[in-house]
Image (cartoon, rainbow, N blue to C red):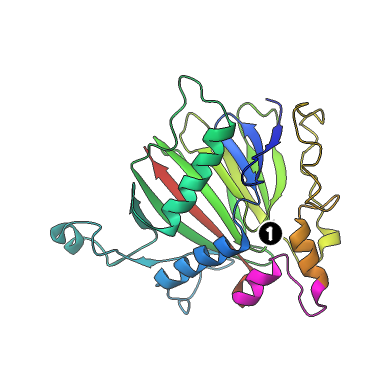
Amino acid sequence: MELVRFKDGPTGTKIEVMDKHCYLLRNFLSIEEQIVLFSHIQDNDRTDWNAPRALYSSSKTLVFRRQNDEESSQEKNNEDEYMPYLNYKFGQKSVVNEMISKANEIINGNIPRVDDDVDLSRYESISMAAIEYAFPNGRFPAHIDHCKDSFVYLMSLGCTANFMVKGPNMGGKRNFQLNSGDLLVFNASTEAAILHEVVGIVDDNIDDNIDDNIDDNIDDNIDDNIDDNIGLEQTENTGFSLEQTNNQNLGQDYHSSCPMALGNRFPILQKRRYGVQCRVHF
């Protein structure tokens, strides 16, 4: 399957169709939205950060407190008070529901559905998990989710991640940089077979972290309908947005692939990347 790129008119988000039911949305979250999302995570975080980690562990799954209205009293009595995810019902007012709805509007407004496609806007619930990846060796092995009747909406906050995706129709692995504010959406079922991996966390030297964007297995002749200006907001030969590059140049004391406005608000993100995984159930 040939990689197709285009831009969403109302939001300016760049969309890359990587495989059937696998989409990369560049610059999906504004800095303000990233701040709101990370504040929501911090407000609910109950992780014991002083607990010893496994030897050579480069990532840590956050723990949240069970929500009061999530289950009946009897069910809650049989479950731990803390869990590695938060649940949200369809129609619930939350920052997570709002961001899923925003993504669905962009995807549904730009990618035609075929008969066997699920309507992403008609989901039943969302479960949100968050994993912290430390610089520079934060990684997660390549895997397929094997989760029936669900899509994953993976948002990235903080430092840039080197990422890999391989779908059955792609012809080869796609290696790229997932920047803060980017969103990867994919069918999480066994049948969709979307292999994905966090390869590592980008260091603070932009020039040494080139994003080839398309690996050698993918044809360079992209769809003729692509906006010729789609790359204007990214600096040549890097995976960084113009905003991120400008942030790097604003002060000699700031050295991080995390956008400056976000890193200054949350200093931990200057050397960390948070993968926010929203599993949307149908």
Left or right side of 55 for 41 = left
Q: What element carries label 1?
A: loop
Would you say residue 22 sits in the magenta stretch? Answer: no
At a point 46% along the width and 66% down the height, the residue shown is: 41
Residue 209, x across and y down, in percent: 80, 57
Quarter of the image for residue 31 reads bottom right
Residue 263, x across and y down, in percent: 65, 72
Pick the residue in front: 230 or 72.
Answer: 230
Q: Can residue 26 be seen in this view?
A: yes
Would you say residue 256 sits in the magenta stretch? Answer: yes
Residue matched to label 1: 160
Left or right side of 113 for 122 = left
Residue 7's place in the image compared with 258, above or below, is: above
> Which residues make up the magenta segment?
250-266
Quarter of the image for residue 243 reads bottom right
Left or right side of 238 for 123 = left
Residue 223, x across and y down, in percent: 75, 27
Q: How many labels does the image show?
A: 1
At a point 21% along the width and 56% down the height, the residue shown is: 71
Residue type pointed to by label 1: Thr
Residue 59, x across and y down, in percent: 56, 63
Pick the residue in front: 124 or 64.
Answer: 124
Residue 98's place in the image compared with 251, above or below, is: above
